[in-house]
Image: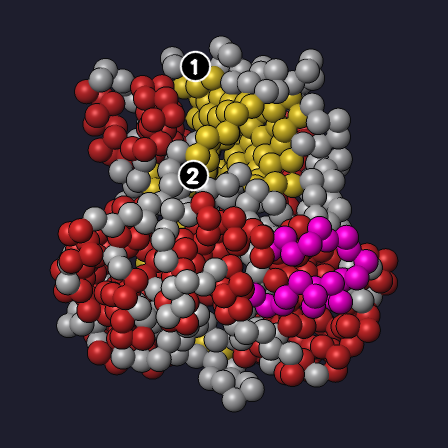
């Protein structure tokens, strides 16, 4: 796991190494172990390294392959790099390192963009062809690794980086608010779908995309993978037990793949079925003395702040080296400013600060962890899925009714000074439904959540908060082969037993029953759902500040009831409406915007 940045210049311009150094400096926490720079023709690259595979200097980046005339800057991990290396050696390629980065270089030379179909992993990378000056920017299938882009100034350059704040080191990036992105943020539970970000001048490369930019600035974009929801007769006839067996085999492979590292790997253990299954499968594969980590918070608003009884049960059952971290409201409040500043985009989920605090502790013990993100989207674990499954003839309005935080009219009342071009978020959902290839409402909803909501919120959250401590997080439930398998499972099997029925069937007998049969939970952070005291003051002060008034995004008359009675304004998904608008303002102020 690392971070990289670059500037590609055309129309007679030269790249500016000083700009690349400034962007790369903002990525230091993503890669605290090393830094490197490279410039050739129309491209300058910078890289910050977190050493996970090939810990020697030969694994440093940017990786320059002079024999092949290629340079690569890479963030992520190719889990099957050893197998690919063996195939490439059979084709006559010689290697000078033991890194997965060099495998990308050789594979791209051997197979071109078709190499992306061979990669098992999470990745974002830039690769330059020295002779032509052509540059390829690539993002993995499910958007696990980020890649942001901007065209500053006169548009004769493209800057890119592993985080949005890194691009803010470029002076002439347009930082005005994108009205469409703001509409998405306020309605679509703070999700801003790619390629947009909340800033007009910054975009993000969509998942499963390769963007090829020629030396003259012309470009083309290709989507190299699409999740299919087609099912054949055998899929429709298959019993839940057979699906559970197939899922178990695929998940075991996914978990084992994510142990590839030259450093120890731990597990973030929330006490839910997903992370508990990861621990159980690693134990089944012979892992001993596995480090596991849990976090809990001070209770509030009648809600418990920890789930230690479940994580403790799993740790005891599998005899892990377990670490518990407990945080009070004072620690949460103290961590919030840096957690918010560490977000590439404003993210309202309460567990951002949980991941942030936990990652700082985990990094004291390991550099790599596995985490259970993605299982709810892929295997049907959310509470809004059953109503959609019962309404097979429904559409975007039905999805918005169970997921959206606000309707279009409420957004207009909250932000009357912003020119919105109609209900763009509802239209976005309808367009996604139409293009998904899925036939039922529930499959269309799960497709949207897996391919759009997931990479632009839960996965981004894990990446940003773990990388703030230089910790690499791997997500086996987003192994693309497992995701493809899950899409073939009829929704009725996934939604059985209160959700994630296939996973529950597979888990029975492998992890404690108390975890399988427990009510669904999330990282509970009551202090951010039930805003009180210093936390409420911090949000109110930000929204009433001079900078907020000058920004004039939100109507003060609409904000005051939220500030006066935050508990009366909880969104359908259980978040404080005040926290959502306050977090956006706090994020903008944290980056001097």
Q: What element carries label 2?
A: loop
Which disc, if any, is residue 208?
A: 2
Which disc, if any, is residue 155?
A: none
Seen from the viewer's position, the closer of residues 586 and 235 is: 235
Residue 275, above or below 92: below
Q: What element carries label 1?
A: loop
Highlighted magenta segment, given as a residue range: 404-425
Which disc, if any, is residue 69?
A: 1
Is 420 one of the magenta-colored residues? Answer: yes
Q: How far apart are marks 2 and 1 (CA)?
A: 25 Å
At label 2, counting other C-alpha atoms closer than 10 Å, the crowd grade (few under 14, some 14-19, many 20 or more) is some
Seen from the viewer's position, the closer of residues 392 and 336 is: 392
Which x, y percent locates residue 209? 46, 35
Residue 270, above or below 15: below
Q: Which of marks 2 and 1 is in front?
A: 2
Q: In this view, does 218 lie to the left or right of 104?
A: right
Q: Is residue 587 left or right of residue 66?
A: right
Q: Residue furthest top?
A: 131
Q: In this view, does 497 lie to the left or right of 522?
A: left
Which x, y percent locates residue 304? 46, 84
Is 287 one of the magenta-colored residues? Answer: no
In which quadrant will I find the N terminus? top left
- Res. 357 visible in picture: no
Which x, y percent locates residue 289? 23, 63
Residue 125, above or below 432: above
Instruction: State the image quarter where residue 164 is shown.
Output: top right
Residue in the image at 41% along x and 62% along y? 393
């Amino acid at each position: 796991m690392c971070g990289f940045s670059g500037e590609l210049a055309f129309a007679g311009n030269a790249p500016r190494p000083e700009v690349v150094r400034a962007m790369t400096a903002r990525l230091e926490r993503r890669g605290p172990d090393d830094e490197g720079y490279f410039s050739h023709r129309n491209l300058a690259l910078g890289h910050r390294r977190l050493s996970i595979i090939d810990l020697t200097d030969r694994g440093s980046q940017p990786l320059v392959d002079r024999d092949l005339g290629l340079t690569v800057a890479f963030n992520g991990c190719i889990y099957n790099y050893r197998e690919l290396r063996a195939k490439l050696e059979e084709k006559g390629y010689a290697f000078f390192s033991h890194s997965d980065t060099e495998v990308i270089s050789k594979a791209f030379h051997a197979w071109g963009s078709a190499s992306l179909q061979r990669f098992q992993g999470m990745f974002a990378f830039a690769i330059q062809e020295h002779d032509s000056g052509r540059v390829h920017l690539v993002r993995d299938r499910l958007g696990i690794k980020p890649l942001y882009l901007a065209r500053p100034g006169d548009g004769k350059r493209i800057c890119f980086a592993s985080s949005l704040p890194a691009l803010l080191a470029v002076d002439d990036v347009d930082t005005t608010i994108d009205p469409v992105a703001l509409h998405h943020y306020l309605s679509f539970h703070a999700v801003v779908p790619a390629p947009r970000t909340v800033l007009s001048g910054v975009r993000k490369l969509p998942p499963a995309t390769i963007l090829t930019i020629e030396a003259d600035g012309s470009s083309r974009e290709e989507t190299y993978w699409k999740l299919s929801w087609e099912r054949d007769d055998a899929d429709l006839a298959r019993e839940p037990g057979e699906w559970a067996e197939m899922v178990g085999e695929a998940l075991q492979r996914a978990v084992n793949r994510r142990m590839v590292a030259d450093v120890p790997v731990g597990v973030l253990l929330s006490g839910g079925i997903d992370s508990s299954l990861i621990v159980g499968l690693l134990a089944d594969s012979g892992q001993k003395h596995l480090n596991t980590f849990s976090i809990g918070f001070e209770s509030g608003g009648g809600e418990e702040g920890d789930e230690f009884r479940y994580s403790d049960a799993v740790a005891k059952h599998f005899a892990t080296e377990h670490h518990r971290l407990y945080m009070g409201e004072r620690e949460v409040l103290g961590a919030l400013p840096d957690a918010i500043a560490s977000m590439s985009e404003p993210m309202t989920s309460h567990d951002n600060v949980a991941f942030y605090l936990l990652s700082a502790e985990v990094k004291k013990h390991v550099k790599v962890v596995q985490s259970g993100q993605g299982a709810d989207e892929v295997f049907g674990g959310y509470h809004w899925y059953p109503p959609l499954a019962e309404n097979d003839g429904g559409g975007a309005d039905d999805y918005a009714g169970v997921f959206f935080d606000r309707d279009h009219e409420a957004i207009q009342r909250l932000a009357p000074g912003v020119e919105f071009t109609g209900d763009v978020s509802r239209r976005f959902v309808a367009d996604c439904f139409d293009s998904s290839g899925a036939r039922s409402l529930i499959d269309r909803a799960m497709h949207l959540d897996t391919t759009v909501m997931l990479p632009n919120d839960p996965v981004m959250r894990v990446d940003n908060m773990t990388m703030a401590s230089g910790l690499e997080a791997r997500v086996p439930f987003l192994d693309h082969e497992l995701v493809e398998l899950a899409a073939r499972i009829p929704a009725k099997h996934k939604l059985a037993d209160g959700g994630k029925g296939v996973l529950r069937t597979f888990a029975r007998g492998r992890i404690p029953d108390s975890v399988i049969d427990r009510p669904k939970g999330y990282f509970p952070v009551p202090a951010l759902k039930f805003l009180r005291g210093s936390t409420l003051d911090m949000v109110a002060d930000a929204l009433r500040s001079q900078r907020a008034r000058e920004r004039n995004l939100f109507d003060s008359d609409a904000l005051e009831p939220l500030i006066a009675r935050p508990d009366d304004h909880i969104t359908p998904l259980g978040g404080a409406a005040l926290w959502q608008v306050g977090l956006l303002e706090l994020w903008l102020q944290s980056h001097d915007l």
